[in-house]
Image: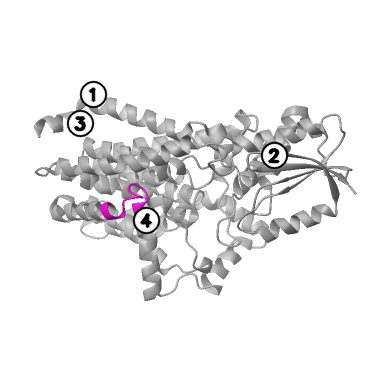
C-alpha cells in the first residue's frame, strides 16, 4: 500500500500529468481540419466575425440562445475573432484555440483535485476529464458553450479559496477571490447562459453561508459586507454592459423578452411527479455519460460507492468539500426541476457548467477510496471499465471517414472549391444551397472565405445579382424529405441541370437558368 501511494508523489506524478495533458490535447486537435463540423451556428458566428475584420462592424451582443429573443454577450465572438484573423478566415484556428482551453481545464482538474484532496485525486480527475469521449468531443465543438468547461472550474476554484482562507487572513487577498468569482459568473453567462444562470443563486447561497455567523467573522462589520456586495455587484454589472447598451438602443428588446419568458410563459413553476421523473432521467443521462456512457449498471455501482465514501467521511469533508459541492451541484438541479419554459426542452449542454465539477467530486471520492483497505482495487477496476468504451469511441471518431460520419469540413471545403473550379472562365455565377436547418450560413461563409482567398473581393465571379449560371448545392435531408423535395421542385422551375458532381454526402448541380 505504501508503494502504491508513492507512485503519486514527486516527479512520477508530474510525468504522468504531462502525458495526460499531451494526450488530452492530441485527442482534442487531431484532424481538426477534417473532422470539424461546420454547420448553422458556426457559419453564423463566422459571418459576424468576418464583418468585424473586413467591414469594421463591432457588436454588443453574441449568439442567440435557445430561448426566443435572448442573446448572449459578445465575449465569445471577441474571444475567437483573433484566431479567425490569424488563420485568414480558417475556422480550424479558433477550433484549436478552444481545444487548448479545454486542455487547460484538464490541468485545472488536477490542480483542484490536489488542492481539495490529494495528487491522486487530481490525477484521477484529469484522466477522466482528459479522455472522456463526451468531454473531449465537447472541447472540439466550435461553439459558445465550449469555454464554460474552463470558467466553471475557475469559478469553483475562487469559491474554494474563499472557503479555505483563514478568518484572520489578509482581507484584500480574500476580496480578490470574491471579485474573480463575480467575474466568472459574468463571463460564463456570455458562453452558456442556460448553465451559468444558476451561478447567480449559487453565489448568493455561498455568500450567505460565508457571511452569516459564525463563519462571517471576517465581514462581521456591516460596512465590510456592504462593500463586498457593492464590489462584486459592480464587477458583475460591468460584464453585462454590452447587452444593456444594446437593449436600451433597441427599445428594451432583451428585457422585454426576459419579462415574457419569466412572466408571460411562466418559465419557473411548481414541479409535478412527471417533471420530477423526467428531470431525474435527464440528470442521470447528463452525468453518467461523462465517464461510463455504455455501462449503466457499473455507473450506478461506482456513483453509489462514491456517495457512500463521501458520506462515511462526513467529518473529514463537512467543513468545505461537501457544503461547497452541494451548493454548486444541487442548485442547478433544483433550478432545472422548477424550470419548465422553452416548451419543456432542455438539452445536455445546458448543464455544461457542471460537467467538470461533478467529475472532480467523483474523483475526490475515488481518491479517498484509494486509502481504504483494498480500495485501490475498486479505483483500478473503475478505470478498467472507463477506458475501453471511451477509447473505442474516441478512436472511431478520430479515424472516421467521409462515409462513416456526419458532414464536416473534409468534404465541405473541397465541394465549395469544386464549384469555383468549374465556374472558372464561365463568368459570374450564383449559388443556391439547401441544408436541413434551412438557413445555409455555413456555406454562405465557406463560399465567402474561399472566394476571397482565391480571388479577393470579386469572389471569383460569385455574385448576388441574378445571372444565367447557377450552382445548386445540397445536403441530404432524411428527417424532412418533404422539405428537400419542395426545394428540388423550385429549382426545376428555375434552371436546367447541365452537369452533376458529388463529393461525399454533398451534391452540386450546374444549372442554366430558364
Task: Indicate which disc, 3 or 4, sits on the residue closer to the N terminus.
Answer: 3
Mark 3 or mark 2, whichever is nearer to me: 2
Q: Is residue 495 left or right of residue 290?
A: right
In the image shown, does 129 or 185 lie closer to the viewer? Answer: 129
Q: x and y percent of residue 59 in the render?
A: 64, 46
In the image shown, does 414 or 18 lie closer to the viewer? Answer: 414
Sort mark 1 into few (<14), some (14-19) or many (20+) by Cα contacts within 10 Å: few
Sort mark 3 into few (<14), some (14-19) or many (20+) by Cα contacts within 10 Å: some
Q: x and y percent of residue 139 in the render?
A: 46, 41
Mark 3 or mark 4, whichever is nearer to me: 3
- Residue marked by disc 1: 11
Name the residue rendered at 40%, 75% in the picture: 270
In the image shown, does 23 or 72 lie closer to the viewer? Answer: 23
Among the 4 quarters of the image, the one containing residue 5: top left
**Placement of 253 over or under 496, stated as above or below:** below
Question: Residue 502: which numbered mark, if any?
Answer: 2
- Residue marked by disc 3: 8
Name the residue rendered at 56%, 42% in the picture: 37
Quadrant occupied by the N terminus: top left
Residue 231 can be seen in this image: no
Mark 2 or mark 1, whichever is nearer to me: 2
Task: Indicate which disc, 4 or 2, sits on the residue closer to the N terminus.
Answer: 4
Sort mark 2 into few (<14), some (14-19) or many (20+) by Cα contacts within 10 Å: some
Q: Are marks 3 and 4 in contact (CB under 8 Å)?
A: no
Sort mark 4 into few (<14), some (14-19) or many (20+) by Cα contacts within 10 Å: some
Give the Cα distance between marks 3 and 1.
9 Å
- Whether the magenta-drawn stretch holds residue 292 is answered as yes
Q: Is residue 287 left or right of residue 56?
A: left
Q: x and y percent of residue 180 in the render?
A: 39, 44
Amino acid at each position: 500500500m505504501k508503494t502504491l501511494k508513492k507512485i503519486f508523489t514527486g516527479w512520477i506524478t508530474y510525468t504522468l500529468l504531462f502525458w495526460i495533458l499531451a494526450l488530452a490535447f492530441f485527442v482534442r486537435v487531431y484532424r481538426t481540419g477534417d473532422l470539424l463540423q461546420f454547420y448553422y451556428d458556426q457559419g453564423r458566428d463566422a459571418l459576424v466575425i468576418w464583418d468585424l475584420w473586413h467591414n469594421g462592424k463591432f457588436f454588443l451582443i453574441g449568439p442567440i440562445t435557445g430561448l426566443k429573443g435572448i442573446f448572449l454577450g459578445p465575449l465569445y465572438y471577441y474571444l475567437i475573432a483573433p484566431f479567425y484573423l490569424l488563420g485568414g478566415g480558417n475556422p480550424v484556428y479558433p477550433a484549436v484555440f478552444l481545444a487548448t482551453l479545454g486542455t487547460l481545464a484538464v490541468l485545472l482538474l488536477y490542480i483542484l483535485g490536489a488542492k481539495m484532496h490529494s495528487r491522486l485525486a487530481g490525477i484521477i480527475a484529469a484522466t477522466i476529464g482528459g479522455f472522456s469521449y463526451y468531454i473531449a468531443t465537447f472541447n472540439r465543438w466550435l461553439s459558445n458553450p465550449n469555454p464554460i468547461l474552463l470558467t466553471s472550474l475557475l469559478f469553483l476554484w475562487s469559491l474554494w479559496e474563499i472557503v479555505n482562507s483563514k478568518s484572520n487572513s489578509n482581507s484584500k487577498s480574500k476580496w480578490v477571490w470574491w471579485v474573480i468569482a463575480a467575474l466568472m459568473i459574468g463571463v460564463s453567462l456570455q458562453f452558456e447562459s442556460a448553465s451559468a444562470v444558476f451561478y447567480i443563486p449559487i453565489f448568493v447561497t455561498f455568500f450567505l453561508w460565508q457571511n452569516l455567523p459564525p463563519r462571517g467573522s471576517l465581514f462581521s462589520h456591516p460596512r465590510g459586507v456592504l462593500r463586498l456586495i457593492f464590489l462584486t455587484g459592480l464587477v458583475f454589472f460591468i460584464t453585462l454592459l454590452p447587452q444593456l447598451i444594446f437593449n436600451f438602443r433597441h427599445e428594451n428588446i432583451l428585457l422585454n423578452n426576459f419579462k415574457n419568458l419569466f412572466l408571460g410563459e411562466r418559465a419557473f413553476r411548481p414541479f409535478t411527479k412527471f417533471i420530477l421523473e423526467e428531470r431525474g432521467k435527464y440528470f442521470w443521462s447528463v452525468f453518467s455519460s461523462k465517464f461510463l456512457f455504455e455501462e449503466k449498471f457499473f455507473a450506478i455501482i461506482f456513483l453509489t460507492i462514491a456517495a457512500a465514501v463521501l458520506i462515511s467521511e462526513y467529518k473529514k469533508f463537512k467543513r468545505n468539500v461537501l457544503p461547497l459541492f452541494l451548493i454548486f451541484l444541487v442548485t442547478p438541479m433544483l433550478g432545472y426541476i422548477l424550470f419548465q419554459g422553452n416548451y419543456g426542452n432542455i438539452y445536455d449542454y445546458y448543464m455544461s457548467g457542471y460537467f467538470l465539477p461533478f467529475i472532480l467530486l467523483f474523483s475526490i471520492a475515488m481518491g479517498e477510496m484509494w486509502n481504504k483497505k483494498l480500495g485501490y482495487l475498486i479505483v483500478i477496476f473503475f478505470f478498467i471499465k472507463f477506458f475501453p468504451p471511451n477509447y473505442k469511441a474516441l478512436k472511431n471518431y478520430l479515424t472516421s471517414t467521409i462515409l462513416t460520419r456526419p458532414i464536416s469540413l473534409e468534404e465541405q471545403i473541397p465541394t465549395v472549391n469544386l464549384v469555383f473550379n468549374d465556374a472558372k472562365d464561365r463568368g459570374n455565377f450564383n449559388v443556391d444551397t439547401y441544408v436541413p436547418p434551412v438557413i445555409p450560413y455555413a456555406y454562405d461563409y465557406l463560399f465567402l472565405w474561399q472566394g476571397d482567398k482565391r480571388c479577393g473581393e470579386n469572389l471569383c465571379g460569385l455574385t448576388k445579382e441574378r445571372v444565367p449560371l447557377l450552382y445548386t448545392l445540397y445536403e441530404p435531408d432524411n428527417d424532412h424529405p418533404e422539405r428537400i423535395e419542395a426545394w428540388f421542385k423550385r429549382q426545376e422551375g428555375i434552371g436546367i441541370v447541365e452537369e452533376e458532381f458529388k463529393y461525399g454526402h454533398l451534391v452540386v448541380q450546374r444549372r442554366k437558368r430558364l
